Every structure is written in structure tokens, then in C-alpha cells.
Amino acid sequence: MVDGAQKDLAQNLGQEAADKTKWIQCDLSDWNKVAAVSKQIRDETDRLDILINNSARGIMTYQLDEHGVDRHMSVK
């Protein structure tokens, strides 16, 4: 998926634009990981132009995460 997105960026916006993109995987239901990734972004750049959060949960039964929040909501 990431390779396809970067290839599309290179074709439409040029390789220089594609080379500026960075993929960071982060489970948004893991709040400690979210904090760590946020700090990583802060430490690695002085500017963030676009951030794409792609999160979802499929159809599933009611389930609480370790914070007592329904898993559907914890990745919102």
C-alpha cells in the first residue's frame, strides 16, 4: 500500500515530492504508541504539512481497551 501511494505521488507530483513523504505505522488504540509517534514527528521535523490518519475497526462485538474505552472509539 505504501509503495503504491509513493509511486502515485512520484507519477503525479514528481519524485522529489514522493521522497518527502514518510510512512509511520501506529496503532491508534495504543495511546502510549500514539504519544511516542507524536514525539518522533516533533523531533524529526519542524513542519508537518499533511497528516493522514487512516484508522478503523471492522464489525465486532463490544470490547473495552485497557483504558476502559470501547475499542471502536479508542481508534477514532
Image (cartoon, rainbow, N blue to C red):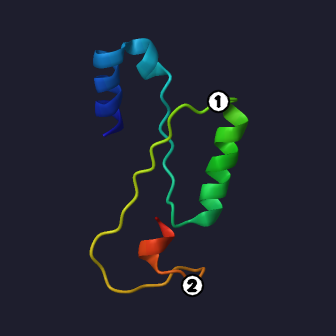
Given the current orientation, which residue lies at the most extreme front position?
A: 49
Q: Which residue is mark 1?
A: 47
Q: Which residue does the image show at 68% across and 33% down from the upper left?
A: 44
- Give the tally of numbered discs: 2
**Identity of the residue drawn at 56% across and 65% down:** 30
Residue 55 marker: none
* Residue at figure coordinates x 49%, y 59% from the top left: 27
Q: Estimate how packed mark 2 is, as few (under 14), some (14 to 19) or many (20 or more) residues with alpha carbons within 10 Å.
A: few
Q: Earlier in the sequence, mark 2 or mark 1?
A: 1
Residue at image coords 46%, 73%: 73
State whether residue 11 is above or below residue 58.
Answer: above
Q: CA distance from mark 2 to mark 1?
A: 34 Å
**x, y (%) of residue 56?**
36, 62
Mark 1 is surrounded, within 10 Å at the Cα level, by few (under 14), some (14 to 19) or many (20 or more) other residues, namely few
Amino acid tagged 1: Arg
- Where is residue 55 shown, x and y percent of the image? 40, 58
Q: Secondary structure at mark 2?
A: loop
Q: Is residue 51 above or below residue 13?
A: below
Q: On the image, numbered disc 2 is attached to which residue?
A: 68
Amino acid found under the numbered disc labelled 2: Gly
Q: Nearer the viewer, mark 2 or mark 1?
A: 1
The answer to the question of whether label 2 and label 1 lie on touching residues, with beta carbons closer than 8 A, is no
Mark 1 lies on a secondary structure that is loop
